[in-house]
Amino acid sequence: MDGAITTINSSYADLVITGIVGLRPRADNVVEVHPLLPDGVWDWFCLDNVLNHGRTLTILWDKTGEKFHKGKGLRVLSDGREIAHSGTLARIRGRSERIRALDQFRPPRARRTANSSALTRLFVEATPR
């Protein structure tokens, strides 16, 4: 039963990350975000601590700019530095340079655990209208 629970939790997190927040996985160093959340539904959300090519991403939506104090709109930060911004919930892209040492890193094959593939700590908080 634990495997089923893990699968459900992973599926839910994936739907939030790639659907509502709209982070699109890519093989290159471009970070693409295209939220499926309609404008006017939530005043704010934050997806934080997403590991992407060795960088930590934060995706913020703040309708008024008063929740996160980073300004109005949709923002993508890579290691705390803004790489993309839009005033609306629109598709945005930014560049996040890879860490070269991590491109060459290969994890050991022995002693993998069920959670060894979990590279993302998920924190999503939002307010429904």
Image (spheres, rainbow, N blue to C red):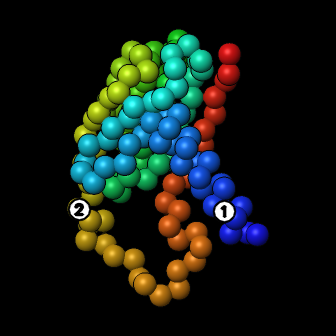
Indicate the position of residue 44 as horizontal and vertical percent values.
Answer: 57, 23
Indicate the position of residue 129 as horizontal and vertical percent values.
Answer: 68, 16
Few, some or many residues within 10 Å of mark 1 (<14, 14–19, 20+): few
- 1 or 2: mark nearer the eye: 1
The answer to whether residue 77 is seen in the rendering is: yes
Helix, strand or loop at label 2? It is: helix
Q: Quadrant of residue 92?
A: top left
Q: Is residue 17 above or below residue 76?
A: below
Q: Look at mark 1 in the image and give the residue it sits on.
A: 6
Q: Is residue 51 above or below residue 64?
A: below
Identity of the residue furthest to the right in this view: 1
Query: Residue 100 — which label?
Result: 2
Q: Quadrant of residue 1?
A: bottom right
Q: Is residue 93 above or below residue 115?
A: above
| CB-based contact (under 8 Å), mark 1 and mark 2 | no
Q: Is residue 50 left or right of residue 115?
A: left
The answer to whether residue 48 is seen in the rendering is: no
Asked whether 81 or 33 is in front, the reply is 33
Q: Is residue 98 above or below residue 68?
A: below
Residue occupying the point 67% across, 23% down: 127
Indicate the position of residue 39 as horizontal and vertical percent values.
Answer: 51, 16
What residue type is disc 2 on?
A: Arg
Numbered circles on residues, count: 2
Residue occupying the point 43% across, 21% down: 89
Q: What distance separates the C-alpha of mark 1 from that of mark 2?
A: 32 Å
What residue type is disc 1 on?
A: Thr
